[in-house]
Image (spheres, coloured by chain):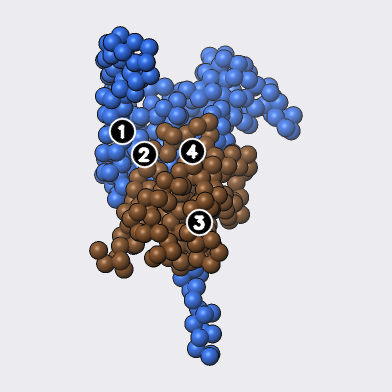
Amino acid sequence: MPEDRWRSRWRYWPLPLLMLLGIVLGVLHNRAVRLHQPDPTILLVQNILALPARLTTATVKWTSRHTGWLLNGYSLAKQNRKLQARLSALKAENNSLQTEADRGVRLSKLLALYQQHPKSVAARVIALRPDPNFDTILLNKGSSSGIHVHSVVITPDGLVGQVYQTTPFTSSVVLLTDPNGMVSARVQRPDSRAIGLCKGSFSPILSMIDLPATADIKPGDAIITAGFGIYPPGIPIGTVLSVAPDRSDVNKVAQIEPAAHFNRLDDVLVLQ
Amino acid sequence: MNSTWKTPLVFTLALFTAALLQMTVAHALQIRQAQPDFLLLLLATGSFFCDANPAALLGFGTGTAAASLAAPPAAGFASIVVSRVITGFALGWLAKNLYRDLPLLVPPVAAIGTALASCLFFVFFPQKQVTHWAVNMAGASLYNALLSLPLYFLLSRLLGRPDSS
């Protein structure tokens, strides 16, 4: 029957339709990124998930802080139940105090940094690298807190990256370790003014490229932002691990250990 | 509950939970460079309970959620969505026509589905760091294979075995 043949042929019509819809969403996303406008799809998804994510993160942290000692205590109880209970309780208390102390130190550092940059917003990381193909993080503050595209994100340790997407209540940040993250940098040594470009490659180590062969740079040198482009000058980027000629043998390339701890990002400051 | 609404409702809740876990827990579960991809896990395991078209729709949902969470700084949004639509469709079609309700196949299908989505993503949006991409793909595939059976049995409990639906 021709009608059956027609039905069978068009049975899988949702596939091309959904693919087309995906492409349309992608085009709209690219357009939004280019025009520095919020992407409506991201706006919708991130706003739906932002509050539950904050609650989940807080619950996981609270649970691990208050019940982690139970898991540790179980294995030790085999050796000495009584002593272990005492030890676990002390460990839990110690862990709790240490966590609070660490948080206190971290927040006091952040406060000191905030006093240096009064026009900044403190934010918390609610998603760290949600997709391993992109080194990005999601913050719990967005355009309603004054964060905008190209806002610079720092920690007391050093530069983290820049905001490239905002919704009213979240911001997406591209980390320095992402190949899309690039910053002009210079050596922080009075007798050296070597300037280059720091870029990421998904590796925990950054590369400083475009250094002339005569550039005065050596292992141990501190690297800071040069102040060109959107990044203000003087923000620590990292420390030089090694210097070698690049592939062309014309320039040098330096390996930089980042100052910021990208795997332990918790509280950050967003410069406005 | 009316079974017409039960499956979409369960998958909507599962999609929300998977996106939330991907946001908050996935990176914390990282071993070396491997981390689970809860959205792809849902897609691969959920495809056992769908025909090709609903599985493609599930792929669209998981793809849009994944792309919105990653919010690629450059291009790549459409590549994530389309790769998952195709993966969902392929897995749904195979589940319906080839291996419906074979729990032993769930882990390999989860691993292959994860790898297929990653490979399609690579084809649509070639990555400069091939090693990084390959290690991520292998890690996520293994992780998803490990997590797939518990999810399969949970979905079976909520939706009934695929052959009885």
| Sequence-earlier tag: 4 or 3 | 4
Task: Please name which of the two marks, 1 or 2, marks the residue nearer to the observer.
Answer: 1
Chain at numbered mark 1: A
Q: Position of residue B135 (x, y in %)?
A: 59, 39
Q: Position of residue A98 (x, y in %)?
A: 31, 15
* Marks 1 & 2 on one chain: no
Residue beneath disc 2:
B24
Above or below, B163 relative to A59: below
Look at the numbered discs 1 and 2 and tell me whether their residues touch, using CB distance below 8 Å.
yes
Figure chain in blue: A
Quadrant for the C terminus of chain A, please.
top left
* Marks 2 & 4 on one chain: yes
User: Is residue A134 shown left or right of residue B150?
Assistant: right
| Element type at mark 3 | loop
Residue in the picture at 63% in, 31% down: A210
User: Residue A60 bears which disc, if any?
Assistant: 1
Chain at numbered mark 3: B
User: Residue B102 bears which disc, if any?
Assistant: 3
| Element type at mark 2 | helix
Q: Position of residue A158 (x, y in %)?
A: 43, 24
Look at the numbered discs 4 and 1 and tell me whether their residues touch, using CB distance below 8 Å.
no
Q: Colour of chain B?
A: brown
| Mark pair 4, 3: CA separation | 26 Å
Chain at numbered mark 4: B
User: Is residue A55 shown left or right of residue A127?
Assistant: left
Residue beneath disc 4:
B35
Q: Amino acid at mark 2?
A: Thr
Q: Amino acid at mark 3?
A: Leu
Look at the numbered discs 2 and 4 and tell me whether their residues touch, using CB distance below 8 Å.
no
| Mark pair 3, 1: CA separation | 35 Å
